[in-house]
Amino acid sequence: MTHHSRRQFLGIVGASAVASTGFAQSANAQETPIVEMGNNYFDPIGLRVDPGTTVQFELAAGAHSATAYADRIPEGASAFDSGTISDGSFEYTFETPGTYDYYCIPHKSIGMVGRIVVGSPGGPAEEDSIPDGEVPSSEAIVDQGTVAYGSSSDGSGNTGGGMMGRGGSGMMSGRNGGGVGGLPAVGGVLGMLGVLGGGLYWLGNQKSPQSTTDDSARKTLQNRYARGEIDEEEYRRRRERLDATDEDISN
């Protein structure tokens, strides 16, 4: 292949890669994001989409709604409301850029809320805190694209004990219920101490190779004396030699 042909070939490959990337991005943009409605949570709790994107609110458990705060959506946007549903899903197309805060009608009082940023943050939702529960900051949502339920308001994944865990079964002290009061960490430390203590106990009860050898020699000496292979004087002499060896090792 000539130098000129090689340059043409590389140019075609590069153009194909760019075209493929653009196609993939367009395909991704056309996908319908899904927000799961579970036991007292929306997941993701924070979502960023482009204007014109249809979002599907899909029921995972229980009976819930996806209902926009009428006073916490961009000016000119309509307040969506699925009503309380016990099966199926609800879809809404977000056309107007800005920040949308929404809640579940039956579970608003226990903090089942969510936030969607369309394009870039803006509107009344940015002026003060959401009145029920907690939502991630719009900056975190824009930066990450999606913020999973259980993350803190800054999207860091650490709730600091202020957000209810999935299923509404209790307060979380960390992302995905990472332990209450640090019990997993304490258990790990105690486990390590137990292993260390067991190792030290084992070492303390082990005999040195020399000590094991001496015990075997004594037993052999005792058997030979019992069988009459050596007399009493020889037995005592060898036994004293073994005892002297033990004293040297202990000192």
Image (tube, rainbow, N blue to C red):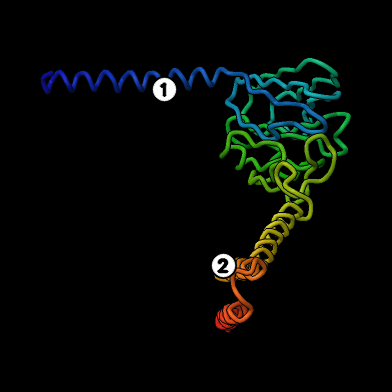
Instruction: From the viewer's side, name the closer residue of 225 and 62.
Output: 225
Mark 1 — residue? 21
In screen coordinates, is 96 left or right of 11? Answer: right
The secondary structure type at the circle numbered 2 is helix
Q: Amino acid at mark 1?
A: Thr
Mark 1 Cα within 10 Å, few/some/many (few <14, many 20+)? few
Q: Amino acid at mark 2?
A: Thr
Mark 2 Cα within 10 Å, few/some/many (few <14, many 20+)? few
Q: Position of residue 148 (x, y in %)?
A: 67, 36
Depicted 225 relative to depicted 26: above or below? below
Mark 2 — residue? 213
The secondary structure type at the circle numbered 1 is helix
Q: Position of residue 111 (x, y in %)?
A: 82, 39
> Which mark is on residue 63?
none
In screen coordinates, is 89 left or right of 24? Answer: right
Q: CA distance from mark 2 to mark 1?
A: 74 Å
Q: Which quadrant, please, contains the N terminus?
A: top left
Would you say residue 250 is visible in this rendering?
A: no
Residue 123, located in which quarter of the rendered image? top right
Residue at point 85%, 24% (across, down): 62
In screen coordinates, is 23 left or right of 176? Answer: left
Instruction: From the viewer's side, name the closer residue of 188 and 6.
Output: 188
Q: Which quadrant, please, contains the C terminus?
A: bottom right
Q: Position of residue 80 (x, y in %)?
A: 76, 23
Comparing labels 2 and 1, the label whose residue is closer to the camera: 2
Instruction: From the viewer's side, name the closer residue of 84 and 166.
Output: 166
Residue 137, located in which quarter of the rendered image? top right
Depicted 237 relative to depicted 43: above or below? below
